[in-house]
Amino acid sequence: MQNNKLGKSNLRISTIGFGCMSIRKSLTISTHLKIIKQAFEGGINYFDTADLYDHGWNEEFLGQAVAGFRKDVILATKVGNRWRADGNGWDWKASKPYIIKTVETSLSRLKTDYIDLYQLHGGTIEDPIDEIIEAFETLVQQGKIRYYGLSSIRPNVIRSYAEKSNIVSVMMQLNLLDHRPEEEILEYLQQRQIGVVARGTIAKGLLIDKPAERYLQFTAGEVLHAAKNIKKLAMEKKTVALQIAIAYAKSHPAVAAAVMGVRTKAQLESILEIANVVDGLEESDIKQLKNGVRTFKYIEHR
């Protein structure tokens, strides 16, 4: 599978990443251990998790799953949210002391002595941004993380970190329905050599095989229209809708990888089957896909 350089870092990540949020504690663990190994053997080297997922269990699972080939993969996790004591929701806890302390828990769960990419899991413009940056820089100096980045959809927050810090990546949602990053932030990130990791590329499956329903600000009818555009182009190119949906997200040169959630062996095999032929689309293809799909803007949340 093709590997791409992630921003200005030395990390080379597979063009398709494995989003571990899709793996839940209630599912058969032995099956998912096999799926992770199969993904690695199929060329996927980028595995993304977060300390928030399943109260940390997801990190524990991933650490166990990649233990036999840890040195050959890129582990990405996230920090910034803390579960409440009663387990009923979580609170935003981004601060230097919290990040410095919490990385130790993630390292232990992941069964590793370093994290390749440590991402701030959200963020607002009112956060103590300089202090948060200091925390990540300290962890880099200590060798506990190799690089750091953001997982955010807020352009004002992204720009602030891009200007003040050494972030190498931003994870954000990007698909045919939610192409706000194209309109507002991708070019900016490319100019600053900050790589983009796209998530949500198939819009919960709505763009490839699930029955149409409301999505973000789109009606079910609008979702159906977008899905039909993808399927039409797939037929013209003699391929499948999944390939077109992923290719759309990867068409901008700022995008290093598309992270896909995988729950079953069949899903993984479908992804691996088209992974080596996922290229960016031509401008004419993109124009065809966007025909009749309206654009909406980010709200500049604080």
Image (cartoon, helix red, strand yellow):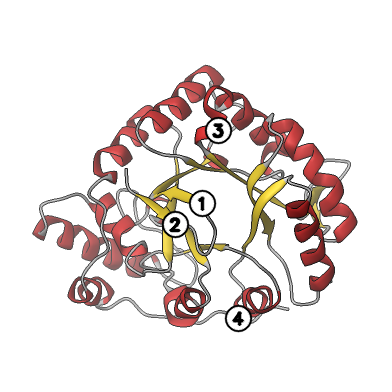
Q: Are the residues tagged 1 and 2 within 8 Å (C-beta)? A: yes
Q: CA distance from mark 4 to mark 3?
A: 40 Å
Residue name at image x 63 percent, y 65 percent = 167
Could you give the CA–CA distance between mark 3 and mark 2, rounded to whole angstroms?
17 Å
Q: Earlier in the sequence, mark 4 or mark 3?
A: 3
Give the foreground label among 4 and 3: 3
> How many neighbours does mark 4 have within 10 angstroms: few (below 14), some (14-19), or many (20 or more)?
few
Which class describes the residues within 10 Å of circle 3: few (<14), some (14-19), or many (20+)? few
Image location (x, y in percent) of residue 248: 31, 64
Q: Residue at x 58, y 63 (%)?
A: 168
Q: CA distance from mark 1 to mark 4?
A: 32 Å
The amino acid at mark 2 is Lys
Q: Which residue is mark 1?
A: 11
Q: Which mark is residue 5?
A: 2
Q: CA distance from mark 3 to mark 1?
A: 12 Å
- Residue kind at label 4, given as amino acid type: Ile
Q: Nearer the viewer, residue 2 or 77?
A: 2
Helix, strand or loop at label 1? It is loop
Question: Of the residues under marks 1 and 4, which one precedes in the sequence?
Answer: 1
Estimate the x, y position of residue 215 in percent, counting from the top left.
46, 63
Q: Are discs 3 and 2 less than 8 Å apart at CB? A: no
Provide the residue designation for mark 3.
Answer: 71
User: Could you tell me how far apart the alpha carbons at marks 4 and 2 are, in whole angstroms?
Assistant: 30 Å
- CA gap between label 1 and label 2 equals 6 Å
- Looking at the image, residue 126 sits to the left or right of residue 277; the answer is right
Counting residues from the start of the chain, the first of labels 4 and 2 encountered is 2
Query: Can you tell which quarter of the image residue 254 is in?
Result: bottom left
As helix, strand or loop, the secondary structure at mark 3 comes to: helix
Q: Which numbered marker is on residue 299? A: 4
